[in-house]
Structure formats: C-alpha cells, structure tokens
Amino acid sequence: ARVEQELVAMFRALNETKEELEYYKACHSESRKEEFVWEEAFTRLADQEGEPRLFFLGFGDGKHIPKFLRSKESRIENQQLTKRETELMIKEIWRAKKEADDAAKKEEGGKRTDLKNFIYTYLAQTYKTPDAITAVAYNLLWGVKRYEYDADIELFMNVLMDEVDEDVYHDQVKLMDDFLFLLRALDERTNGRVLGAITLADFEGLLHEFFYSKTDEQVADMVEAAEEDLRVKAPEQFDQKVVAYEYLFEEDENFDQGPFAECVRDQHLAARTQFVEEVRRGLMAATGGTKPVSLSVAQEILLSVDPSMKPKLMYEYLARGFRVSMNTLHEKIGDEAKPLEIPLGTFVKHLRMGVILQKGRQDGGKGDKGGKGGKGGKGPVKRRNSFVLAVQALKQYKGEESDDDDMPAGAKKEGKKGKKGK
C-alpha cells in the first residue's frame, strides 16, 4: 500500500511538472501578450482534483506582472497554509496598509497605496530576501484561492483583482464598528456605565434605529441570528432576555464570527446586489440593451431606483459609472454637443466596484415621525430618548453634527460579503 501511494504521488508530480512546464513556456513566449490575467493566475495555483499542488512555477518577471509575484524561480514549494494562517496574514496586511495610508494622508498630496503594490512593500519589509518574498507571496495567493468561501478572504481577493474598490472593505469594517459603538453608547446611557449587555427589547429597537430602512422581517432575521449566537456563548443571560452584545462581534481561533455578523453581511450583500441589478435592468429597458448609456439616462434610472437619493450621492455614482472626475461630470451635464456616453456593461461594472449606500425609506418616515414602516413592516419603532442620545453620541464620535431626525451615516452604508459569512 505504501509503494502504491508513492507511485501515485510520483505520477501526479510528473503530470503536474509537464503541465506546469507547458505553462512556463507560454509565460515566457515572445508572442505572449503583455497582460496579467488574475483568473488565469489563480487557476495555475488552485488545487488539482481536490489535491493541493506540490509546487508552483513563477509567473515570470515581466513588468505586467504585479511586483510581489515577479519571479524566475523554477519551483516554489506549496507550504499549504491553513485558513487561520492565510487570514492572519491578510489581517496583518490590512493593518499595516492602514498605518501606511494614514501616515501618507498627513503628508501634502499623500495618496492611498494600491493593494498590489503595498503587498510587495509589506513582504519586503517583513521577509527581506527575494526567495522568501516569492515563497510567501505565492503561498498567500494559494491560500486566498483555497479559502475564498470565507467573507474576508473573498473581499481581499476581489480588491486584489480590482473587482471592487478598497473603500468597500473599509466601509464594511466601519459599519460594524459604528453599530458596536452605538450599542455601547445605549448601554452606558441606560445602565449608567458600559456593562456589555442590554435588554433584548432595546437591542431589537436599536437594530430598527440603526438599520432604519430594513423591513421588520430583516430585523427579525438579525435578532434570530443573534439568538443563535448567544444561546451558545451566553445562554444564561439570553434566557433572561439580556443580550451580551460583545459576543456578537467576537472571532474564534480561525477568525470566524458567528451567525449575527454573517446575517448582517448577507443582508448588506443582498441590498448591494439588488440595487445594482435594478439599475442594470432600468438601463436595459431605457437603451434597449444596445445603445450606450448617456448621462441623462443614467441620472434618470438612478433616481427611479431610489427616489430618495440625494444629489451628492447621485453625482458620486455617475462619476464612478462614467469613470470621470466630479468637475468633468458637472461640465458634461447639459452638454448636448458632446454628450457623455458609455457602454451599459461598463457603467454597471464601474458602479459595482465602489461602496453602495442603502436606499432610504420610501415612505419618508424616520423613527416615530410617521410613515408606515418598511415594506412588509409593522410600523415605525418609537424613538426612546436613550436611543436618540446614543445616536447623538455616535455622530459626535464621527465628527458629525447631531440631528435628532438623522440616522447615523453608518446605518446607510452597504459593504460586500463573500459567499460565506463569518
């Protein structure tokens, strides 16, 4: 049996070598186009029939290849990183990148570094030698592909491939941070100090307050997910209708969060996807699917999808969709001589890349100010004074003006989740 296993491994290695050498030749062929295709790269690193590759071949050292992946190495050993190791490295990259970007902002004209470029900087500072940088880079990419079912890993992958903007990642982090801050603020204003727990009724009310455009059904789903979390992590408190909310944001040893965080991310993804799809369908109907999208048509469709959209947000979407600066956009508004036009698919692709803000309530109601609640909802949630104070605390924390009739900006934001939440 041992000999048979060794023979199987040997033949697999030989087949892999043949396949990889053919690809290596293609990579270094003079006729090869000077472009880097991420899908192709991930395919070359992916497992074969469920079995991890024994080694990787470098993609070459052409200028079209991301710097952190440039290599002339004939073989790079597959160290088969665990999910924990992969996610820990990703977390460290995001942390270091934020520090570097924050420092750059303090300098005049400082800009945020592209993720691909920063990864090389990070690896060079951490691992020093070219061989070590190459080994870690390729193994990181293998881990990203293998564990792409994870929400955070898939988002990292999408930013790396330029499928979404890095702002989507920061927006997702900020949203959860804002909600946790709001929970603590309500906790302090209700109990006199932060105890780490509030009543189930207050928790549900704050969900309505923070995610104010959610339907009652969506809020009920979040409450149910929190219950599933807490019956495992804090059963005695939850049996007394008390929500030990800090547990909802904890990660396990593999950096996975529980059902509540997964539910919130699922709903954000659904809202984001729904908005973009409604815009796409509207543009298809308006253009017949063949004509290019004009500025006036795009503006009309955006407002039809979300009539409550404020002008500033609409212009941000238009500038992103047409890939122009805000100044150029305003110059083109009303310009019939040289109208701004773009293929429908390109506009939708650009729109999808950035942060999508959640649509506001269509009934015009907020809190106890009137309205019939969200679609399928039972009606508005009465805004207790402690809720209002908590919202004001969040606004002050974020440097915004307090306005009793405004929800926290974080309540409107939609991030992106991967195929499986955390």
Image: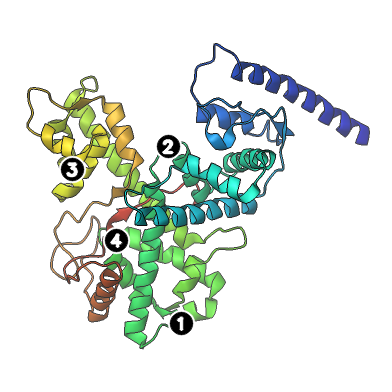
| Among the 4 quarters of the image, the one containing residue 412 | bottom left
Q: Which residue is mark 3?
A: 315
Which amino acid type corresponds to the residue marked 4 in the rendered image? Ala
Q: Secondary structure at mark 4?
A: helix
Of residues 232 and 198, which is closer to you in this image?
198
Q: Is residue 422 visible?
A: no
C-alpha separation, residue under disc 1 versus residue under disc 2: 47 Å
Residue 399 rendering spot, x and y as whole percentages: 26, 67
Of residues 226 and 60, which is closer to you in this image?
60
Q: Are marks 2 and 3 in contact (CB under 8 Å)?
A: no
Q: Secondary structure at mark 1?
A: loop
Of residues 265 and 194, which is closer to you in this image?
194
- Residue displayed at 18% across by 44% down: 314
Q: Is residue 5 visible?
A: yes
Residue 368 rendering spot, x and y as whole percentages: 17, 71
- In the figure, 7 relative to 211: above or below? above
- Would residue 354 be found to the left or right of residue 417 on screen? left
Picture disc at residue 162? 2
Picture disc at residue 240? 1
Q: Can you say which quadrant of the picture contains the N terminus? A: top right
